[in-house]
Amino acid sequence: MTLAPRSEFPLLAGNPDLCYLDSAATSQKPRAVLDAMRAYYEHDNANPHRGAYELSVRATDRYQESRDRIARFLGVPDSATLIFTRGTTESLNLVAAAWGRANVRAGDGIVITGLEHHANFVPWQQLALEKGATLRICDLTPTGEIDLDCLTGLLDARTRIVAFNHVSNALGSINPVREIATLVRERCGAIIVCDGAQSAPHFPVRFDALGVDFYAFSGHKMLGPMGIGGLVGRRSLLERMGPYQTGGDMIESVLDDRTTWNVLPHKFEAGTPNVAGAVGLAAAVDYLDGLGMDRVAEHERLILEAAIGSLGELEGVHVLGPPVSRRSGVVSFVVDEIHPHDLATVLDQQGVCVRAGHHCAQPLMRRLGVPATTRASFYVYTDVSDVVRLAEGIARAQAMFASPSAPRR
Amino acid sequence: MDLSALYQSIILDHNRRPRNFRELVDADRRSEGRNPMCGDELTVWLKMDGDRIDDVSFVGSGCAISKASASIMTTTVKGKTREEASALFERFHDLVTGSPAARPDDPTLGSLAAFSGVSRFPVRVKCASLAWHALRAALKGDDAASTERQ
């Protein structure tokens, strides 16, 4: 059983044989999301915050309602501290640029982990290079989780930023965010940045209970459209930060020789916003709440158990990462003698979509000692039968690459 | 689509037992090929005798297509002149990209004809051409080639 019917997802309904196991890259979209975006453009479209006419007011209202709705979904009590961005990558760059450039000095420390997606790695690496700060990369345990003892050792009075993901996109490891936040607060005054791209879609998240200063997420991984996401931050920090980009909408007053900034959240949203994207994302979180985030997490856990069970029965298949109890709906694995790229091609010929490669996590691949992995990831429309097809496809690839005779179809 | 068109038995064979898969200690040229999309990396070594490729080898990690392509490339270009090798790359490139100029029955392609199926798998074209980009860079005297900067 799927948790959400495939019939409510036009792409899946139109391709009944498609086995889509790449939701960690992007999710499919329910009709409710597509309809909400279409309705916005058909009935309420105007440039918000500008026009002195009713239609513009409606567009402004739709935008604000969407912000409030998404803030409620993420446990953000003050919706003005939820900044809309293009997604996690832009959110993390915003913090690196607007907070980092103003606050990090030569000799300061920036701590990240070996588990990070490039989006939560490269901005900090570049900031450190620009400022002459030291980038420290926390080691991982053999199961691909943050080594808390190592992390403790990397923190000192000069640590200014600690950034890590809530859930690893490559392995599915769920990191103990609150425990890490406590550990950091006890040792230094660093800001704590959490990459939530892979957590917000998959289980209940309450920003106000995480203990972090910034939380970044992407709409398209949680049934919403591409091009919208957000950054949630502590008000006191956001207010002291300068803008990320400048231009229209983010100003209070523009004089010939200087400019003052608009209030939150507008200070960080220069230019015409992606209202349709925000409306679509609000419809997506409505849809998720309709399913129940606890049930989403439970459903993925059942699929995950089935997947690890069936892959475990195949000789030569090695699943990487932590046990099911500390893992989100992601299975990364390697198969003896078959490169992930070849495996993905063979699976694709059977209608099974998986990701093969470094998953935008080359530092992690080096630490795991593999050039690449194959990754299957699950969501509300995944069924155990998808996992069965994955296992059958792998077995077929093994037969093809092992056989010294001509390959079978 | 028939997978056996892509993974022909000669390709599977070269993947399992790549030829000239070693560092060439007395090489006079070397170039690294990199496909940033998938992380595949390989190094090609060349030993030139004037204008002729006296010896060629490679080492690297990659998929069956990129490894077999590198292996078959080394067996094909050994003994060829720089010009002959470049001309062969062009014919090979036409073949794997499905260019109208491609001539899969061209006898001079030899074992390279086994890659004719690649043109039906557009995402695998870069796998098949990675080693050739590295070879071309080495012939030009560059030490690196990327499938994204051609």
Image (cartoon, coloured by chain):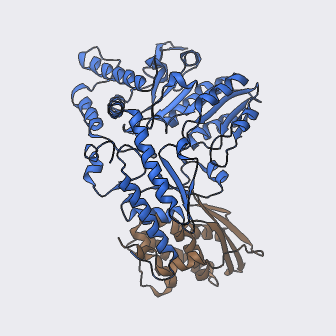
Across and down, in percent, residue A178 comes to 59, 28
A197 vs A320, nearest the viewer: A320
Q: In which image quadrant can residue B119 be found? A: bottom left
Q: Is residue A285 visible?
A: yes
A226 vs A273, nearest the viewer: A226
- Image quadrant in which the N terminus of chain B is located: bottom left
Q: Which chain is brown?
A: B
Across and down, in percent, residue B50 comes to 71, 80
Return the residue found at the far left.
A43
A108 vs A185, nearest the viewer: A185
Across and down, in percent, residue B54 comes to 69, 82
Q: In which image quadrant can residue A55 be found? A: top left
- Image quadrant in which the C terminus of chain B is located: bottom right
A161 relative position to A52: left or right: right
Q: Is residue A200 above or below residue A59?
A: below
Identified at 57% across, 57% down, the residue is A372
For chain A, what colour was chosen? blue
Identified at 25% across, 46% down, the residue is A7
Across and down, in percent, residue A3 comes to 33, 42
B95 relative position to A373: left or right: left
Q: In which image quadrant can residue A298 be found? A: top left
Q: Is residue A360 above or below residue A200?
A: below
Identified at 56% across, 78% down, the residue is B14
Q: Is residue A190 visible?
A: no
A20 relative position to A100: left or right: left
